[in-house]
Amino acid sequence: MAVTKNALVRYQVLDRCFRNPGRTYTLDNLLEECNEALYEINGDTEGIKRRQLQKDIVFMESDQGWAIPLERVRFGNKNQHVSFRYSDPSFSINNQPLNQTEAEQLKAALFMLTRFTGAPQFDWIQEIVPIIEDKLGLVGNGEKVIAFDQNLETQGQQFIPVFFSAITNKVVLSVTYQDFVNPEAYIFQFHPYYLKQYNNRWFVFGHKEGTEKYDWNLALDRVLSIQPTKTAYIGNDTDWESYFYDIVGVTKLADGIIEQVVLRFSADQAPYVRTKPLHPSQRAPKVLDDGSIEVRIYVIINFELERLILSFGERVQVIEPLHLREKIAGILRQAGSHYSK
């Protein structure tokens, strides 16, 4: 049985419903839950019928699926209704090892991906393929041999596919948002355009209705809920790769200008900065007599750049521009004052 994107969405919804001890789910309830989820992912869709839902349940109960421990409970005056739930409330298809169908499909997909390695625009495949193979136990003896730098507790990751689908299908979303400033959450309509990850956090950029900004920045870990709307989608022709080229991170000041930033790194820090440039504009550094290096980058100065510079501690010194040098010096003096007593 071929597993499509829509089928995976339905299996996840059914798994969530079967695990929920606080509610009774009949076939009609399950059908409603599945179709609501499909609408959130695909926008305008007719959903599925009862016949497809029943096939999904049969597949999940089979050995080709997850052999789920599903029980059917009759209720009502004449036991005319049937609800569905797991006999083991701790069971979840997400906790089960890959079945044979999933493993073969993933192997085929990874084989197709590896055919693109070698081309510059597909360099990322060389990193992600071994991670997937290791995490899912598709090769070797199943032992984990590679680690991936991510925060498993990061909130908001569940909204990534919803925003991605809304961007590709041009759907306006009603977003409930709780920022770090306002004490209460608030709701607004949002036209999403672009998703970006930085420093293990995800952000979405778009147009917030009621404003003139078309690069409004939302942190996904501050999003509480999302609902699709029928509002007409307002498009945007921003070249987002160019948009981010002149900055470090995700914050682009409306009145910011590109400046030459000169940083002097100590001799022991120099090898790291050479092999991991701070920004794409960084070129071969100037080597000084004591082994230290001077690095030049051309960026719009923002909060993330300041944090990056501070992360090097005493191994870096800002040479230019003067206003950035003074600001970093002031921050360090303030930090030092916490330890002066």
Image (cartoon, helix red, strand yellow):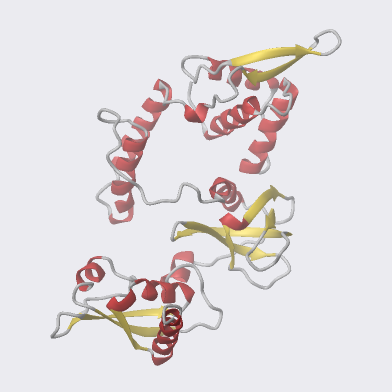
Q: In front: 234, or 95?
A: 95
Is 285 above or below relative to 40?
below
Determine which quarter of the picture holds residue 18: top right
Is 4 above or below relative to 276?
above
Q: Which quarter of the rendered picture does the C terminus lie within?
A: bottom left
- Counting from the top left corner in percent of width and height, residue 307 is at 43, 73
- Counting from the top left corner in percent of width and height, residue 276 is at 27, 66
At x 35%, y 83%, the residue is 261
Q: Residue furthest left?
A: 289
Residue 113 seen = yes
Is 37 above or below relative to 270?
above
Q: In front: 188, or 78?
A: 78
- Counting from the top left corner in percent of width and height, residue 243 is at 48, 70
Q: Residue furthest front?
A: 341
Q: Residue furthest top?
A: 78
Q: Residue furthest right?
A: 77
At x 68%, y 54%, the residue is 172
Position of 216 with respect to 31 (left or right) is left
Is 46 above or below relative to 310?
above
Give the number of callouts.
0
Residue 46 seen = no
Q: In front: 315, or 74?
A: 315
At x 70%, y 27%, the residue is 31
- Counting from the top left corner in percent of width and height, residue 159 is at 58, 48
Position of 223 with respect to 22 (left or right) is left
